[in-house]
Amino acid sequence: MSNPEEKSKTLIIPVKGMHCATCAQSISNNLYKREGIRKADVNYGTEKAVIEYDPDKVKLDDIAESIRELEYEPVMPGDAEIREVTMRITGMTCAACVAAVEKALERVHGVKEVVVNLATEKAFVKYDPKQASIVDLREAVRSQGYDIADEEEVDVYEQELEKSRQLMLRSWYFTIPIMIWMIPHMFFGVAWPNHMIFNIGMTVLSAPAIFWVGWPTIKSAIAAVKHGTANMDVLIAMGTVIAWLTGPASFFTPLFNYAGSSTMILSFNLTGKYYEALAKGQSSQAIRQLLKMEAKSALLLVDGEEKEVPLELVKSGDVMIVKPGEKIPTDGVVIKGDSSVDESIATGESMPVAKHVGDEIIGATVNQEGLLHVEATRIGKDTFLAQIIRMVEEAQGTKVPIQKFADDVIAIFVPTIIGIAFITLVAWMLIPGPLNRVLAWGAGFIPWVDITLPQVMLAISAMISVLVIACPCSLGLAVPTALMVGTGMGARNGILIRRGEAIQTMKEIKAIILDKTGTITKGQPEVTDIIGDDKLLYYAASLEQGSEHPLARAIIRTAMERKIKLTQPNEFKALRGEGVTGKIDDKTVIVGKPTL
């Protein structure tokens, strides 16, 4: 009898549209309703879902449907996702150059948008990776006689952060004038210039903030209520909209106008969301750094000719040509050539590793000096780097025991707060006496407390206060953020944490045992002893100026620290794996192994 665990598959997908920890909990609960879902960890911090499922019982389309019916958007494997890249272009001198580059890029099939800036010498390009590739974009630019200095994919997190920042700023643009206008009324009881204009001004100025800037919040709240859930946006939307409605109502009833206060509620909420986005972007930076390590293209040997292709088109068995200083496109084995490779990003080893025919080589590592022909053996999700990224993503996506407790609290938090808010409203209406006495006591040191307001207004104010003061997001975001920072910093420093539970268990660690001498190092060699005087260092460092080896850089760095003036070497020759020879001041100098 087969083990059901053997059939299970793990899916890691980004989920767009989450606004708080309760959103993540709602998605997780809805996924568990599907037969065949064994685990559904949705992480608000990383905006990803780690789903373990039985492919015989549930299909990918079913998983996507479970998420979309809550009005969130999963990015499923194979979905066409528009990529955005920034390219620094050299050689542009005028507006005509800009126009030529823009037209050339726009002609590439699959390019959606092009913006070229002469001042920054950069081109911003949106394209469909199924129709165009980074290689096509390069060729389009080079066809016009210009070259590309470097290129970098636009960071989605940076875009989300900027979007949050713009919403926050727009909200404060309306809120600050309202706050200034409210000061005389709050502290001195003076509605300037009169009550009618003051009420009209508060209502009109706050409307764009609530219904334009705050529309994403209101839309999220409506979607949550429609599907029988209640997230943080429900609390904020109820508080702000009810507070704003007192503005129009104040013209026909004795209700106090709290429309101005509604913009403050929204502004503080959006400011909090901005700092949440900032925290998420910083804590997930390690994954983005790992992704940036990948080469974007490969130089293949096809029928005796060199051909540059996007990395996605490299197949197992293809022969890649890797020149000195270039990244190894994907995992493979050396079939021709000798060189040394910097594998520090994969192994933490600071010294380059010699590579000869038959040696395995890791993708994204850097070829140092020789020309290599490498046969691709592992591509895509099977490469060493892809497995590291997947391992870190799974660790970040798993829920530690303390986070599961936090999720249980969040699940009942919002409904509980809404219930307390309505109980507060009823209590202020039915038993005003004791509550009014507390309010009168507060009026002695809080100048804007007005105990002369109608009882219904005091009741509504108390209810709004309960709704907007409660925020479960800090509870839901704290644990995922700590998990992302821990696993992210570990990955950046060469420590891979396979399960999130390990982070929580590590607090019990009393000692660390290492099984390899030299594992804990600075990551670069340095000179520790010099047998002789500075003359010896002068000759060695002068000769090593012709080498790119880490030991050579260490010797040169020591000479520079001692302010020794160096001489350029003549007849320099590097002997791979042995050392270097040359002439300094017409004297033959040899630096390397004793056998040399």
Image: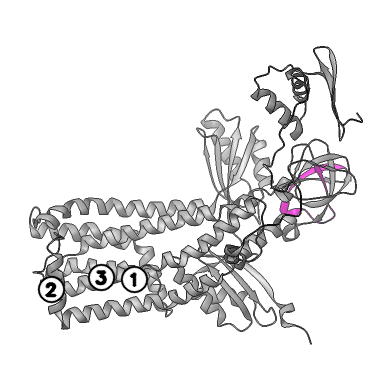
Is 235 left or right of 195, judged from the image as shown? right
- 324 relative to 69, above or below: above
Q: Hey, what amino acid is under mark 3?
A: Ile
Residue corresponding to mark 2: 437
Q: Is residue 339 left or right of residue 13?
A: right
Q: Residues within 10 Å of mark 2 (few under 14, many from 20)?
A: few
The image position of residue 369, as x and y in percent, is 80, 35
**Residue 224 in the image, given as x and y percentages of width and height:** 41, 74
Whether residue 306 appears in magenta in the rendering, the answer is yes
Residue bearing mark 3: 464
Task: Look at label 1 and name its amino acid.
Answer: Leu
Up-down: is 573 above or below 567?
A: below
Q: Which residues are magenta?
A: 302-324
Q: Considering the numbered disc 2 on the image, is that residue within a helix, a strand or a loop?
A: helix
| Residue, disc 1 | 235
Q: Residue visible at 50% across and 32% down?
A: 119
Mark 1 closeness class: few <14, some 14–19, many ≥20 residues within 10 Å: many
Give the residue at x 67% y 62%.
391
Disc 2 residue type (three-letter): Arg
Could you tell which of marks 2 and 1 lies nearer the N-terminus? 1
Q: Is residue 120 left or right of residue 450?
A: right
